[in-house]
Image (cartoon, rainbow, N blue to C red):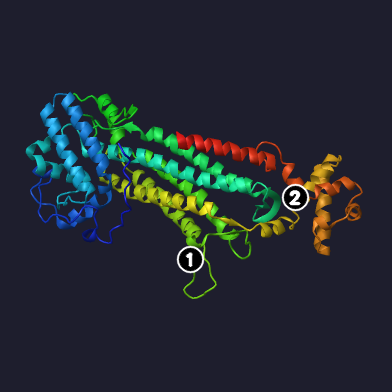
Amino acid sequence: MKAFQPTRQKKASSSSQVKQTSQKKSPTKSAKAWEGRFTEATHALVERFTTSLPIDQRLFEYDIQGSMAHCQTLEKAKVLSKTECQKLIRGLTRVRSELRESQLPFADSDEDIHMAVERRLTELIGPLGGKLHTGRSRNDQVTLDLRLYLRDQLQVLNGQIQAVQSAFVQQANQHINTFLPGYTHLQRAQPVSLAHHFLAYVEMLERDKGRVNDALRRVNVMPLGSGALAGSNYPTDRTFTAKLLNFPALSQNSLDAVSDRDYVVEVLSILSLIMMHLSRLSEELILWSSQEFAFVELPDGFCTGSSMMPQKKNPDVPELIRGKTGRVYGQLVTLLTTLKGLPLSYNRDLQEDKEPLFDAMQTVLDSLTIYAELIQRLTVHHEVLEKAVGSGFLLATELADYLVQEGVPFREAHSIVGRLVQTCIKNKQELRDLSLVNLQAISPRFTKKALTFLTVEGAIDRKAQIGGTARKQVARQVRSWEQRLKKKTSA
């Protein structure tokens, strides 16, 4: 089945002003599915307060997909005849078409998308529509829909992560011989290849993809047949249902299946980690594109200006992604807080699981999509980087390591070079300005060979072990990533 790509939904400012993807709500008032127990109609305030339709209507594709499989399972169990099953599926197909075309009017009694589909089905095919819900509950129905939704969305998410990785690898391939200061504590530390720096984000995102794939295995479990909490009284073949819906595994405990949302929490955790990585990237792009750094320039189409100051070019996209990170974190905490006090099994609190998930997923997908494009179009200011990498005593560690090679204990070598740096600061010199006489004035352990350790290229290429910033090693990593990402794209 083709993955359903939901559109962004706006949160309603009030329950009576919700904009729905399907058109106007019907003025008619249909019967509630559970109204036989009650002597009083639901209060209008409660109707508006409890409805989840504005949020969960985006699940309609999955709800109908699950209902069609349920019909076939009921037919196999002899609960429905073949004719009844076919009629139900034809009716569900028509309901799906109406929803896709935004032609299904919702009724006041539609508490959620599940009841809206069943009500409309019954309007179309008559009392037979009432048989659709035989042997299932909205409790197992909604978690089925969520798992189907997540199964699709996690694959979309993986694709978007890989798009950002590809953009970084393309940039890295162009900048193996471009050097910049590497930082610790936001202080210049040692020179690194810009390609090496870009590939650091590729590694982070690869771990994110790994977490997505791990979560997908736990998401891809079929809960239908768990009923409200105890299972079903009908001889339904859950393995058959799982095969119809392409689930490789079945839930093994009906109480757990309908009442836990740990798989949603896991996804929100992964989304939070992705946003954390994107936020770190955002912070660097904001710093690097500032006049104080001027290492890179963001494309004009991804920036905005000031309504007052004509000279401004603001890095709004990285700033917004950095800001939206807190929003995604908040959605994770929202669901954790919802779940922490719930006894087994289902409680209505679980209705609050979808809005944080939908919002966080869309936020992350939007952020990845825009960064995949922005990174490709990033401009690097080579002359600024060349100047930056030549200052700030970035080669101090190289001199200390040289002394170690000459037999000086590292702590003593560290102290010698520290004094050398102090002298340079006092005389307003850089290490590259020093002569052998200057070096030997600090320590006679320096020889002419020490001067060969005062080049950026040498400092880069000496880091030649696996994971280092040496150009040969980085070039090897770039080729490896190009091949790995190409294989995953073709797969």
Task: Identify the mark nearer the N-term, 2 or 1.
Answer: 1
**Residue at disc 2, secondary structure:** helix
Vertical arrangement, residue 19 with respect to residue 194, above or below: below
Seen at 53% across and 70% down, the residue is 312
Residue 481 appears left or right of 105: right
- Tell me if residue 239 can be seen: yes
Residue, disc 2: 456
**Image location of residue 395, percent across then percent down:** 76, 51
Q: Of residues 59 and 261, which is closer to you in this image? A: 59
Q: Residues within 10 Å of mark 1 (few under 14, many from 20)?
A: few
**Image location of residue 129, percent across then percent down:** 12, 38
Q: Of residues 92 and 107, which is closer to you in this image? A: 92
Looking at the rendering, in which quadrant would you find the N terminus? top left
| Quadrant in the picture for residue 124 | top left
At label 2, which amino acid type do we have?
Val
Q: Which mark is residue 33?
A: none
- Tell me if residue 446 can be seen: no
Residue 61 appears left or right of 309: left
Q: Of residues 51 and 446, which is closer to you in this image? A: 446
Residue, disc 1: 304
Seen at 35% across and 44% down, the residue is 339
Vertical arrangement, residue 292 with respect to residue 283, above or below: below
Seen at 19% across and 47% down, the residue is 98
Residue 383 appears left or right of 2: right
